[in-house]
Image: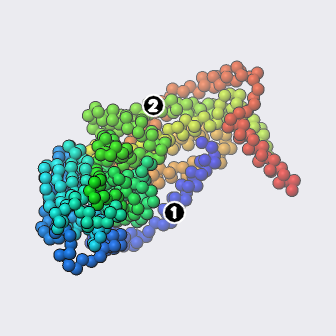
Amino acid sequence: MDKNTITGFVLIGAVLVGFSYFSRPSKEEMEAAARQDSLARVEAATQHKLDSINREKQALLNDSLKIAAVTDSTKAFFINRTGEEKNVVLKNKNVEITLNTLGGTVNGVKMLNYKAQDKKSPVQLLTPNTNSMVFAIEGKKEHIISSDYYFEPVNQTDSTVTMRLTAGNGGTLDFDYNLRGDSYMTDLTIKANNLDQYFSLNERKMNIIWTDTCRQQEKGHTFESRYSTLTYKEKGDDTDNLSALGNVSEDIEETLDWVAFKNQFFSCVLIGHQDFTRARLSSQSFEKGENLKYYCADMQTMFDPTGKVPTQMQLYMGPNDFHLLQKHNALSTSGKDLELEDLVYLGWPLFKWINRFLILNLFDWLTGWGLPMGLVLLFLTIVIKVLVYPTNRKSYLSSARMRVLKPKIDALSQKYPNKEDAMKKQQEMMTIYKQYGVSPMGGCLPMLIQMPIWIALFNFVPNAIQLRGESFLWAEDLSAYDDVINWGTSIPLLGDHLSIFCVLFCVTNILNTIISMRQQKNQMSSEQAGQMKFMRYMMYFMPVMFFFMFNDYSSGLCYYYFLSGLTSILIMWYLRKSTDDKKLLEQLEAYREAHKNETTKLSGYAARFEAIQKQREMMRQTKNKK
């Protein structure tokens, strides 16, 4: 790692630390913030936002469907304007889906094999008070809004039902639901029967407005919100999502295969096998409280008034489990490649492929042993460290070679004490490295190879549903922060708790920084070490900033990083103990002797460095002449 790179990291760290320090609130401000964060204020703010959302939802419905008020219900060609709300339940061993006769759509979903935060009741993915799905069809005389009618359940079994609207002429509009075996996939087919006279044959579309006030399912509101997004898949392309931060709304021009209301570990996905068009998607975030996000999807799909071609959709309502989602792709009724597994975010393309073909396979192999998740993460760390050990060893040996050559580099500082001779000193330094077969970049490049794995696991661990609810040592849930130390009052930048695994991670990070700085000092010339003294101390602030970043993150991720840092320390200790500097210098001298008759023409990094130095020297000389 060269001086410029370290300088960049130090400046970034200094800016962040300075901003955190000078923006720190006073004691009075902290007390005022604590009072504002009371439960009463949170509830009031949440209710105000819900009221605003409901008004927006109604305005959206009126604007999108251009509903004309019906003053005389006898004019309605459907006779189901009045009735009694009833629930119809479809159920298998994994999921329970509740349909309501008012509107004929899903208004409740329970995950039977996943527990809520109370560890007793099942996860309630959708609730009647927060979820709404409205289908609307433009008629010749009036628009048909599904939420205005009471549907009659017919042909009901444990896993199937037809929600039916009957017209005055005996025609019907059927919503057929079929829960597929023991899966989380439900087929939804909408078909008109003998309704040609009520619809214009030129209008072959149906409007869908789907909304949900997504509830908090996990312990950490901030952390869960970061991984909860409105996600969609473009037809013939990859998935995308709205920003997880703040309030955002987008008009999507592309045709969509599906739209998903995604929590961190569970999703409700509406799949359109005749595609979704003219989609308007929006997402709003709540402050800490019972609710997490508000999602809204306003879009269109095909509807055949003649009934010859039914509208085919599917609903996936289940966990974000990578392999489970892959299996559900095979349940597609149209043969579309749904790529539902993309709901498990594994990072940008490079990190995604590392996770998909390396980390995920290792994780599955280890979980197949039936071990506690804490041990799975331990063995995962060990396996990964074994795989990258050759790069660690190469990096260390490169640093060790620079260390044993340090006396020769220091001699150059005495030979060229003046700044005017800096280029000559650098040229001779590069020549020495070339003669002894040492590359100044040899210590950084192997470490850069490991960085993608480090970042890939940053994306993998928080999205691994297998960690949800799994305890280890003092952590009750490895998918959320551990808060054995909790003072109940939110402190800016810190929150209301202290994550022990986060502290351990930061401590090992500090120790690794100390080791790294010592290695760099030992391989630098005395002059370089003096120049880097202040920067080395500034680098110690990076682990401190990591603490404030990761205190809210999952304990499983902090635990993995702690193990990774600890094993790095042990590996460095072993390499230091097993490396004989005297023998290493003898090897370098033997290399120099064997290649003494070869030209010392520089190549690679050394040649580029020399070219840059020559260019700088020419610019300096030109400036002095002027």
- Residue 43: give x, y in percent of width and height: 27, 70
32 up-or-down from 596: above or below: below
Q: Which of marks 2 and 1 is nearer the N terminus?
A: 1
Q: What element carries label 2?
A: helix
Residue at the image point whose x is 21% and y is 64% from the top: 103
**Mark 2 burial class by Cα count in 10 Å: few <14, some 14-19, many 20+:** few
In 3D space, how far apart are the residues under numbered discs 2 and 1 (Cα atoms)?
39 Å
| Residue farthest to the right, as pictured | 625
Residue at the image point whose x is 13% and y is 53% from the top: 155
Q: Which image quadrant: the N terminus? A: top right
Between disc 2 and disc 1, the foreground one is 2
Residue at the image point whose x is 39% and y is 61% from the top: 279
Q: Quadrant of residue 423?
A: top right
Tag 2: amino acid: Leu
**Mark 1 burial class by Cα count in 10 Å: few <14, some 14-19, many 20+:** few
Q: Name the residue under label 1.
A: 19
Q: Name the residue under label 2.
A: 387
| Residue 188 horizontal side relative to residue 166, left or right | right
Q: Which image quadrant: the C terminus? A: bottom right
